[in-house]
Image (cartoon, rainbow, N blue to C red):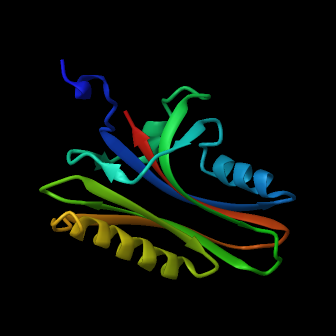
Amino acid sequence: MTASCCMLAPHSYVLLSTDADSDTPLNAFDEALRARGVANFNFIGVSSILPRYCRQAPLSEVRDIQEGSFMYCVMSRIESDTPGATISSAIACATTTSTVGCVAEFNGHCSGTEAEREAIRRARAMVASRDAEVESIEVTSATHVVKQCGCSVSLCLLLY
């Protein structure tokens, strides 16, 4: 028996981004997740590799997963309590035909376009470091202008 027989490997992933404002950073994060219907999961952060056969799925596939379940993900998250600040998060998933896919995240005090551009650049660099060619890149981002305590979060949810 090989070690791989007991390992988890996702068959698909879901990309989503969201943002919210509240009275504390934690509550802003929770409100952002609630806005997309994913607040009732326990997120476990993982590094940024997808199996070759892993493909994007619609958010509706998450709806059938039991609330309270562990959900593996790559997360880009930024919070701020500076009124008027612009914060953005982004995640890019680059797939290849020859090797694993790569997920890159970025967040900062910038526009969503800038966050997406940097996440894509990072994903391309990860693929290039594996001597592979990008087959496709999917990206998601959220931008938030802070009122009180703001949060912008982008997720690559891994489905098993």
Looking at the image, residue 118 lies above or below residue 17: below
Could you say which quadrant of the image residue 4 lies in?
top left
Residue 119 picture location, percent across and down: 43, 71
Left or right: where 1 falls relative to 84: left
Could you say which quadrant of the image residue 120 lies in?
bottom left
Which residue: 68% across, 55% down?
A: 32
Left or right: where 47 falls relative to 18: left
Residue 103 picture location, percent across and down: 37, 59
Between residue 40 and residue 96, name the one nearer to us: 96
Quadrant in which the C terminus appears? top left
Q: For the image shown, how many numbered marks are present on the structure?
A: 0
| Residue, far left | 98
Residue 11 picture location, percent across and down: 30, 38
Between residue 90 and residue 21, name the one nearer to us: 90
Looking at the image, residue 96 lies above or below residue 11: below
Residue 50 picture location, percent across and down: 31, 49
Quadrant in which the N terminus appears? top left
Which residue: 58% across, 81% down?
A: 111
Which residue: 25% across, 45% down?
A: 51
Left or right: where 83 falls relative to 10: right
Which residue: 38% across, 72% down?
A: 122
Looking at the image, residue 160 lies above or below residue 145: above
Between residue 102 and residue 20, name the one nearer to us: 102
